[in-house]
Amino acid sequence: MKVNGVVHPAPGDPRRLLSDHLRHELGLTGTHVGCEHGVCGCCTVLFDGMPVRSCLMLAVQAEGHEVTTIEGLAADGAPLHPVQQAFHECHALQCGFCTPGFVMSVVGLLAQHPSPTEEQVGEGIAGNLCRCTGYASIRRAVHRAGELSRK
Amino acid sequence: MKPPAFEYHAPTTVEEACALLGSLEDAKVLAGGQSLVPLLNFRLARPPHLVDINRISGLDGIYERNGGIAVQALVRQSAVEDSELVSRVCPLLSAAVRLVAHRVIRNRGTVCGSLAHADPASELPAVLLVLGGHVIARSTRGDRIIAADQLFTSVMETTLAPDELLVEAWFPSPAGPFAIVEESRRHGDFALAGVVRAADRLALFGVAATPVLADSADPTRGLQPSGDLEATPEFRLHLVRALTERVFAA
């Protein structure tokens, strides 16, 4: 499977979840693991460009596919991805645990709706839980990310 | 390691998948995995074999057929949500699929998987029932058409045989006004109760062991919903009455 543009060997054990494979085998610990049953959204990654829950996929299912994690959005030292930049500017995080999942979901949301309405923003982030911000700053960040992406 | 140990099979053709389902003991089909993988992670399900159908090509088509929409086994819910064909031919299905969990879940979850999983609080089984649709079950013994009212038997139980693969679902166009409404604690959660209308037919979900057809004049007749931390039986009955009014006002 290709992760962030790099080809990796096939996972050994079929019952290894994609989330655990990314973290434990590939050391990509930016993908966070919260509820592990698809509710919290922390483990969201892009699978062939579409956001999915990595805790609800087996790593073997990603064989032959492309996975993008939060680490793949911007190289070290390079400018942040527009969604990351917007979260930074709008203070859309406090503890940061949910942030990688939010960012990956929002990347998918903006691919679908480049200028989302307030309702589309609400719908787009409804599958991610944040216990710090109260979501208002995250909503602002989504609109700001749309602006930055369109520039 | 969260899921229990299982043997993993990844057939690349429907024939191969059916042969596996016909020969393996207690095999479970893995499609989108958005319901099955949580059950594995919690170890509520311990199937000795998983037959992953995601490597099968040519199983992700959406077609217009006999005045309705045919959806093949690997069609993701998000593809149905975005399909102009579905919104034109069976707009009730477009409306219903938007109520299924969240977009990120729908990117992976399949329509046919929701039907085969048969969660009583799930929207799509009730939509199939209210429209009088059917599914096609394939095995090495051949194809079998199962009408919606013959498919759902109990909580997460269907008349699909262990060796059968649900290859396609057919949703006829609604024959009149339609609406689907539900009440849940949070957006995207399973419904405490839901009501779906197609012309003068009404189906309820989340209030019995299967989706059930109901009389629009007396939708709670014979209904004995269970209670839990989120809703008492009385509250569920109240929701059915209130939501029924809403689908007929829509």
Image (cartoon, coloured by chain):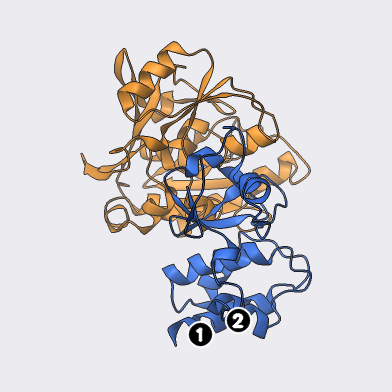
> Residue at the spot x=73%, y=45% of the render?
B231
Relative image position of residue A93 (x, y in whole percent): 72, 74
Chain for numbered disc 1: A
Which badge, 1 or 2, comes first in the chain's sequence?
Answer: 2
Determine whether the residue tagged by mark 2 lies in a helix, strand or loop.
helix
Please name the amino acid that badge 2 sits on: Ala
Query: Which chain is represented by orange in the image?
Result: B
Give the colour chain A carries in the figure. blue
**Horizontally, is A21 left or right of B110 in the view?**
right
- Residue nearer the viewer, A86 or B39: A86
Pointer 1 residue: A148
Pointer 2 residue: A86
> Residue at the spot x=46%, y=42% of the render?
A63
Specify the quadrant that holds the N terminus of chain B: top right
Cα gap from disc 1 to disc 2, whole angstroms: 8 Å
Would you call the spot at circle 1 few (<14 residues within 10 Å), some (14-19), or many (20 or more)?
A: some
Please name the amino acid that badge 1 sits on: Leu
Quadrant in which residue B138 is drawn? top left
Q: Is residue B191 visible?
A: no
**Horizontally, is B172 left or right of A140 in the view?**
left
Q: Is residue B122 visible?
A: yes
- Residue nearer the viewer, A7 or B49: A7
Relative image position of residue A83 (x, y in whole percent): 56, 76
- Picture layout, residue B46 above or below residue B208: above
Q: Which mark is residue B227?
A: none
Would you call the spot at circle 2 few (<14 residues within 10 Å), some (14-19), or many (20 or more)?
A: many
Q: Are marks 1 and 2 in contact (CB under 8 Å)?
A: yes
- Picture layout, residue B250 above or below residue B49: below
**Horizontally, is B141 left or right of B105 in the view?**
left
Residue at the far left in the pictured view: B66
